[in-house]
Image: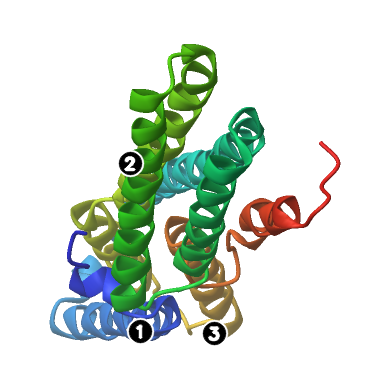
Amino acid sequence: MIELSLLQRTSIFTVVTVLFVLIFLFYLLGYRIRRGVIKRNPEVSGVELGAINTTLLGLLGLLLAFTFGMASARFDTRRQLVIEEANNIGTVILRTDFFPDSTRQLLRNTLKEYVEARIAFSQSGMDMKKVVFYYLKADSISKVTWAIMTRFAQKDNVTTKTSELVPALNAMIDITTTRRAAGESTIPDSIMYFLFVLCLCSAFLLGYDQRHKIDWIVVGGFAVMLSITVLTILDLDRPRGGFIDMNVPNQKIVELREMFREPYNH
C-alpha cells in the first residue's frame, strides 16, 4: 500500500475551510494593495484588468472542469470494480457446488472468511492500518482457497470441476489488485495545488481590480461556490471518506453473506 501524502491525509473539510478563508484574505489583500498603489500614483486608477481577469477565470473554470472530470471518472471506475468483485466472488461460491461435499465445505468456509475480510476492508474508512490489515488478510485467505482447489485437482482425474472454478477464482483474486490500484489512483497533488494557487490568484486579481467599495455578498458568493466545487472534487476523489461514499456498491459484497445460508436457492 502506498503512503498517503499530506494533502490526502488532511480532512477535506479542513482543506476547504482554509481555502475559503484564504480566498477572502487574498481578495482583501489585492483590494488593499490597489488602493495603496492609487494613493501613491493616481494615474493607475483608470487601469482595468478585465481582460486578464476574464482569461484567468476562464483558465480556473477549465481546470475545475478538468479535475472534476478526473475525480468523477475515477469514482465511477471504483464503483464498477466493486460490483465486478461482488459478481466474481458470487461466481466462485456458486461453482463450489461442483465439488464433493468435503471439499465444497472447505472451500465455502474459506470463502466465507474471505467475504468478511473484504467487507471489513471496504468498511475501514480512512484508517489505513485497518485497510492494509484486511487487504493482507483477504490475500492470505485467497491463497488458502487456491491451495485447497489445487490439492483437489491433483487427486481428481475429472478436470471439468477445476476448469470451472479456476478461471472464476483467478478473477476473484486479480480484481483485488485492480481495486487497490484504482483506489490509489487519485488526482495528482501537483494538479490540486495548482488549482488552489489559481483560486487564490483569481481572488487576488479580482480584489486588485475592485476600485469601489467591496460588495461582501458578491465576494462571499464567489468564495462559497468555489469552495463547494473544490469540496466536491476532493470528495469524489476520496470515496473512503466524506459525503460521496461507496456504501451502495459495497452493499453488493455484504449481500454475499446470504449465499452461505443453507439451503441457498441458486
Count of number-bearing discs: 3
Residue 59 lies, in percent from the top left, at 35, 44
Q: Mark 1 belongs to which amino acid? A: Val
Dot 3 corresponds to which residue? 216
Pick the residue in front: 212 or 120.
Answer: 120
CA gap, disc 1 to disc 3? 18 Å
Q: Quadrant of the N terminus?
A: bottom left
Does 233 sit above or below residue 76?
below
Does 37 sit above or below residue 252?
below
CA gap, disc 2 to disc 1? 52 Å
Residue 46 lies, in percent from the top left, at 31, 63
Dot 1 corresponds to which residue? 18
Residue 131 lies, in percent from the top left, at 36, 69
Q: Is residue 2 left or right of residue 82?
A: left
Does 177 sit above or below residue 21?
above
Residue displayed at 43% across by 56% down = 237
Pick the residue in front: 98 or 31.
Answer: 98
Q: Quadrant of residue 70?
A: top left
Q: Which disc, if any, is residue 118?
A: none
Q: Quadrant of the C terminus?
A: top right
Q: Is residue 107 left or right of residue 183?
A: right
Which is nearer the N-term, disc 2 or disc 3?
2
Q: Mark 3 belongs to which amino acid? A: Trp
- Foreground mark, 1 or 3? 1
Q: Are marks 2 and 1 in contact (CB under 8 Å)?
A: no
- Foreground mark, 2 or 3? 2
Disc 2 element: helix
Dot 2 corresponds to which residue? 147
